[in-house]
Image (cartoon, rainbow, N blue to C red):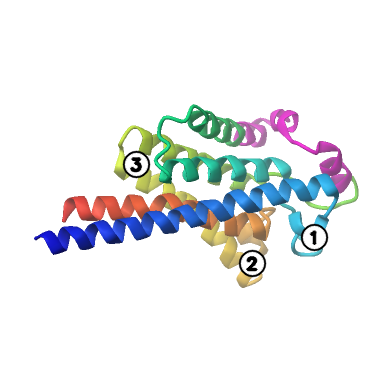
Amino acid sequence: MKPLLAETKSVREKIELTSFYFAFIVFLVGTLTLISYWIGLEHLYRPLIGGPATNPLTALCFLMSGAYILMDTSKHTDHPLKPLFILAVFCAALFKIIDYLTGSHITEVAIPFYIQVESDLESGKSNIMALNTGIMFFTFALAIIAKRINKSLLTLLFSFITFTIATVSVLGYLYELEDFYGQMSVLTAVLGLLLALSVLAPTLATVWYDRS
């Protein structure tokens, strides 16, 4: 029995470590994307020439989401910024969905480097937080909220939806199916996939081993 428990603990630790690495990549790339707007390096926030860009608000959401997972996996459970990070992501995603449904422009107020975004849009380039991106962050935030109140099945559900949205976009880029990714950039799709896995994998492991 003890070897089995030790093996279970080892697997969980490896999954949590992988989750930490995924979150670190998300945090790092989100930060670098914001820096690329600051220094005017378009190739980083728009990896594919003529393709959709990763909007600064999207990059900021990745930075905050990655920071939350990093603090969570590092066991800094009492850090005062943790709930603020996820609340900010939740609000940004919710307002994006409201913008789409009502035709309003609430999220424009929160977009950093808006002058560059506006310049891109005026020149006919794609640079918005797409609706599928907003929904992806919304379900991610719901997954984190569910995790905070110890609702593992809801965490699995919402993180799986996040994973599915990102996966569909990645497949769209792989098979050149524009309808699959819309105005979500390839960078956003890949980071969204890593972000979803950083929550989905450890939660799935917890549920699986607890029910075994």
The x, y position of residue 212, in whole percent, is: 16, 56
Q: Amino acid at mark 2?
A: Tyr
49 above or below 112?
A: below
Any part of residue 150 in sight: yes
Point out the frontmost of discs 1 and 3.
1
Which residue lies under the disc numbered 1?
A: 43
Which residue lies under the disc numbered 3?
A: 154
Give SS at disc 1: helix
Residue at the location (54% across, 52% down)?
A: 24
The x, y position of residue 79, in whole percent, is: 47, 30
In which quadrant is the N terminus drawn? bottom left
Q: Amino acid at mark 3?
A: Leu
Q: CA distance from mark 3 to mark 2?
A: 29 Å
Circle 2 packing at 10 Å, graded few (<14), some (14-19), many (20+), is some
Q: CA distance from mark 2 to mark 1?
A: 17 Å
Residue at the location (42% across, 46% down)?
A: 73
Give SS at disc 2: helix
Q: Magenta region: which residues?
A: 95-121
Inspect the magenta stretch and tell me whether residue 199 lies in it.
no
Residue at the location (48% across, 29% down)?
A: 83
Residue at the location (59% across, 37% down)?
A: 93
Which residue lies under the disc numbered 2?
A: 173
Inspect the magenta stretch and tell me whether residue 114 lies in it.
yes
The x, y position of residue 160, in whole percent, is: 42, 52
Q: Amino acid at mark 1?
A: His
